[in-house]
Structure formats: structure tokens, C-alpha cells
């Protein structure tokens, strides 16, 4: 597959090591210069199997739709639209999603223009991303990895609606995503509920709640207060295997994730009430002034 946008798009997703990505991401490239595609192509590895989930065309179509759909809006608004559809399209296990080589490949070989569109600033006619980590970096910072993991951690079984709420608030993505509390599913859903109710909304409020919750207990504490149900890994694998028969993503409606178990409603409500109580006494700069007004 070839594109008229200045770089070659492969037919299949593969892997590009951190060491190769680091050598490619010179200050010139990060600041908007052309990518040395020959180096990337020669050092990329093939996908592990022939599954259609490794087809690059659907990922490329997703990012093109996102850039077109949000062309007149701030690029940050694309996160809530793209995250659930990227998760649905790639259909990875968590072990596969932990491989930074896949995300390097997508960012540098499939959609470097999206990385620049989403994170870049115009600097004298060139789009500077400023952070090489948006192309190749930690899982919660890298352009595509952060969206996939946000969808994985904030989905409620097959329901991606909590993902849209979480990804519509940049403070949740930038501050909360990497915290251990989100690996406890009721905690993640309780946080989403408070954001959706606008109990917390600003960056200061999100940070205040997270600090209060962290000081009050560990993930183990949350599990005692609000136990979770084990995920159905067989259902997850069935969803992964069904990629050929399932419809492709729809631009106007949310897809359905794996039916691997919803979060217990009672546990979410318990934690949401507790977090709300903690937030009422959390030291948030400006909160007292706002209340007084």
C-alpha cells in the first residue's frame, strides 16, 4: 500500500524496536523533518501470525477518519472517539499491548502524520511534536499506546461508554491513567462516574481526588471495600478470534468490546460514594473560594 502523504504505508502491522526508533527520532524528525523510511522498512519485523487483526489498512483508515472528523476542532477531542475504536480494531491481549515495538511501528510507519497532527505545534512551517516519547515512549505517553490502554482500563466489559467519558477529560488521561488504582476495575469505574456527574472536572479537582484516594488506601484496600469479579479470559479470546466475522468500526456508533464480564455495580457505587466523601475534604486549591462565591 502506498500513500500520497510522503511516506510508505505497509500492508501489515509489525514491530519496530525501541533502539531503532531511538536512532530514527533525531531532533530533526521530532521537529517536523522527514522520516528516513528506508531505515524503518529495513529494520521492521513481520507480525507473529496471519490474523487479519494485523492488517494496517484499518488502523490507517481510523487515523485518517479522526483527522478529517476533527479537522475544525482541537486535536485533543479526537481521543474520546479514537480510543474505543482503536481498541476494538487491534484486539490485543494485555501482553501483546505491552510490546512497545508494535506502538513504535504504528507511530513511525503507519501514522506519523497523525502523531504530528495530534501533538504537534507549528514552528516556522514545520510541525514540531517536541517529545520523541509521543512516537516511542512510555505506555501512558506514547500516542497510540495511551489510547489503547485507556480503553482497556476504563471499559466496562463490552461497554466502551466509560472510555468516552474518561478520554474526554485530558486530566484523567494525563494524570490518572498510569496509576495502579485503575487496574482495579471498580476504582476506574467509580472515577468515571464522578467525572460524568461533574463532581470532579478540572485538573485540580482530579488531582485532589486522586491524592485523597491514594492517601486513604491501596489497591488492596479498594478490593476489600469493593470486590471485583474475575474477567472471562475465554470470552476475551473468542472476541479476538472473531475479528474476521465482526463488522469493522462504525464512525458514528460505539463498537462492542469483549463480553468478558462487567464490573459489579454495587462495588462501583460503594467506591464512588467513598471517593466523593474523600473529595469533599480534599485540599484542592481554589475550592474554598469557589464555594464561598
Image (tube, grey):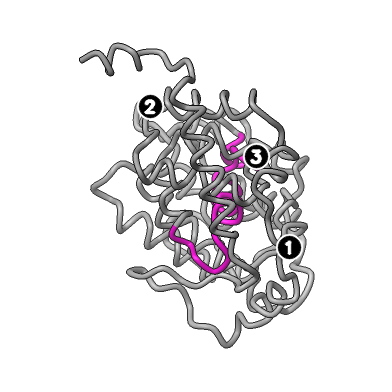
Q: Is residue 135 magenta?
A: yes
* Residue under label 2: 123
Q: Is residue 140 above or below residue 205?
A: below
Determine crowd level at label 2: few under 14, some 14-19, many 20+ residues with C-alpha closer than 10 A. few
Task: Tell me if mark 1 has few (under 14), some (14-19) or many (20+) residues whose alpha carbon lies within 10 angstroms of its own.
Answer: few
Q: Residue at x 72, y 70 (%)?
A: 232
Q: Quadrant of residue 230?
A: bottom right
The label nearer to you, 3 versus 2, is 3
Q: Position of residue 27 (x, y in %)?
A: 58, 28
Q: Which residue lies under the disc numbered 3?
A: 181
Q: Which mark is in front, 1 or 2? A: 1
Residue 49 coordinates in the image, percent (x, y): 77, 75
Q: Is residue 72 left or right of residue 263?
A: left
In the displayed image of the protein, which residue is found farthest to the left?
293
User: Which image quarter is the C terminus in?
Assistant: top left
Viewport quadrant of the N terminus: bottom right
Does 224 sit above or below residue 280?
below
Residue 10 lies within the magenta run: no
Q: Which of the two residues, 243 or 25, is positioned nearer the viewer here? A: 243
Mark 1–mark 2 Cα distance, whole angstroms, equals 49 Å
Amino acid at each position: 500500500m502506498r500513500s500520497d502523504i510522503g511516506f510508505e504505508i505497509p500492508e501489515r502491522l509489525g514491530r519496530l524496536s525501541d533502539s531503532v526508533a531511538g536512532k530514527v527520532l533525531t531532533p530533526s524528525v521530532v521537529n517536523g523533518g522527514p522520516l528516513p523510511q528506508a531505515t524503518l522498512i529495513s529494520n521492521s519485523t513481520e507480525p507473529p501470525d496471519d490474523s487479519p487483526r494485523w492488517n494496517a489498512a484499518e488502523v490507517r483508515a481510523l487515523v485518517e477518519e479522526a483527522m478529517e472528523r476533527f479537522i475544525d476542532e482541537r486535536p485533543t477531542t479526537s481521543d474520546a472517539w479514537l480510543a474505543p475504536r482503536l481498541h476494538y480494531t487491534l484486539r490485543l491481549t494485555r501482553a501483546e499491548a505491552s510490546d512497545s515495538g508494535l506502538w513504535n511501528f504504528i507511530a513511525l510507519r503507519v501514522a506519523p502524520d497523525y502523531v504530528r497532527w495530534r501533538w504537534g505545534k507549528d514552528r516556522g512551517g514545520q510541525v514540531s511534536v517536541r517529545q520523541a516519547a509521543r512516537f516511542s515512549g512510555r505506555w501512558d505517553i506514547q500516542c497510540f499506546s495511551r489510547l489503547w490502554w485507556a480503553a482497556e482500563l476504563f471499559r466496562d466489559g463490552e461497554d466502551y461508554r466509560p472510555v468516552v467519558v474518561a478520554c474526554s477529560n485530558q486530566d484523567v488521561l494525563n494524570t490518572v491513567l498510569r496509576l495502579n488504582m485503575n487496574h482495579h476495575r471498580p476504582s476506574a469505574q467509580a472515577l468515571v462516574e464522578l467525572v460524568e456527574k461533574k463532581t470532579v472536572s478540572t485538573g485540580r479537582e482530579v488531582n485532589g481526588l486522586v491524592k485523597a484516594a491514594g492517601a486513604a488506601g491501596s489497591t488492596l484496600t479498594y478490593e476489600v471495600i469493593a470486590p471485583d469479579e474475575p474477567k472471562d479470559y475465554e470470552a476475551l479470546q473468542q472476541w479476538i478470534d472473531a475479528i474476521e466475522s465482526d463488522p469493522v468500526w462504525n464512525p458514528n456508533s460505539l463498537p462492542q468490546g469483549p463480553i468478558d464480564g462487567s464490573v459489579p455495580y454495587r462495588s462501583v457505587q460503594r467506591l464512588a460514594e467513598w471517593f466523593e466523601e474523600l473529595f469533599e475534604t480534599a485540599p484542592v486549591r481554589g475550592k474554598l473560594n469557589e464555594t464561598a462565591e
